[in-house]
Amino acid sequence: PNPIDRQRFMGSASDRWISVDLQGSEWAKRSRAAEVKFFGVLAHEISHLYTAQTRKDFGRIAWMNEGGADYFANRLARYVGLIDQAQFDARIGAAIEECVRLRKMSSDSLVLPAPRTNPGVPYQCGMVVHAATDILMGKAIPARKFFGFWGDLIRNAESSGGLYSEREYFDLARRWAPSADLEFLADFVENPNRDADNDGRRLRKILKTSGDSSVEVSR
């Protein structure tokens, strides 16, 4: 299609509202692909609406909030049946490949504010970290996975002035499922001076089997 007709979108959110702007006439042609794309944008912004209620400067920790919102959107799409398990796994696999590629180009830590990083790093690498955390949580406590983990994180933040950080994230994860893989994830987030190819291999090993991501959405 003509570039001006292609499906484009822009989303934003605060602690009170979300906005999704769709551009391009291709949106008028109803299709499964368009439905999945729109659902993903909407779910991503809804995730921000939820986290912004608690995290007062939630835009600072981009890997947690942007990567988390992307993972939330894909998890939810899997849960409602818009994508199947193979498609879900393929999306996680693609995020690993893109994360590795971007980490080779960027010397910034994931804990830095988004404007100082390669724009794709917090989205792709953050999504991968959340996916890996989800797997590790599910192995340790099958009935308490991604949404239950984030529920605990948000509740903890509510009792501490509305703040959470990567430290709170990994401290909580260690209480749920301490492991060498979790320590690898923590160092992956905080230390930019790592071998991206080796990290990619470790991430693929953690995420090689995700099980059924359509179950155990809540605590």
Image (cartoon, grey):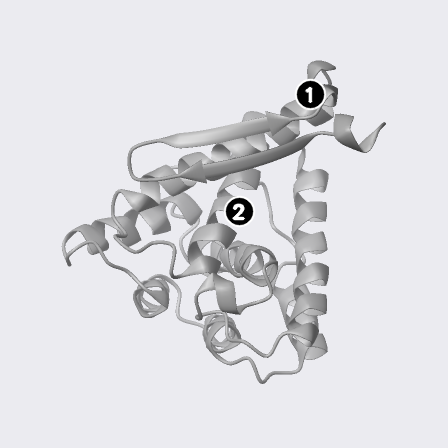
Secondary element type, mark 1: helix
Residue 90 on image: x %, y % = 72, 47
Give the x, y percent position of residue 174: 35, 68
Q: Quadrant of residue 140?
A: bottom left
Is the residue 27 above or below the residue 167 in the image? above
Q: Which residue is mark 2?
A: 71
Q: How far across and how far down the image is residue 150, in percent? A: 35, 49
**Residue at 74% over, 15% down:** 29
| Crowd band around label 1 with a 10 angstrom C-alpha radius: few (<14), some (14–19), many (20+) | some
Towards the viewer: 143 or 129: 129
Q: Which mark is residue 27?
A: 1
The quadrant holding residue 168 is bottom left
Mark 2 → mark 1, Cα distance in angstroms: 23 Å
Left or right: 191, with 206 as reference point: left
Q: Are marks 2 and 1 in contact (CB under 8 Å)?
A: no
* The N terminus lies in quadrant: top right
- Kindly give the residue lying farthest to the front in the view shown: 4
The amino acid at mark 2 is Tyr
Q: What x and y, as percent, mark residue 20?
A: 50, 29
Say if 138 sits above or below 203 in the image.
above
Q: From the viewer's side, name the closer residue of 81 and 219.
A: 81
Question: Residue at image x 69%, y 75%?
Answer: 104
Answer left or right for 170 relative to 32.
Answer: left
- Residue 59 in view of the camera: yes
Residue sitting at 29 percent across and 54 percent down? Answer: 153
Of mark 2 and mark 1, the one earlier in the sequence is 1
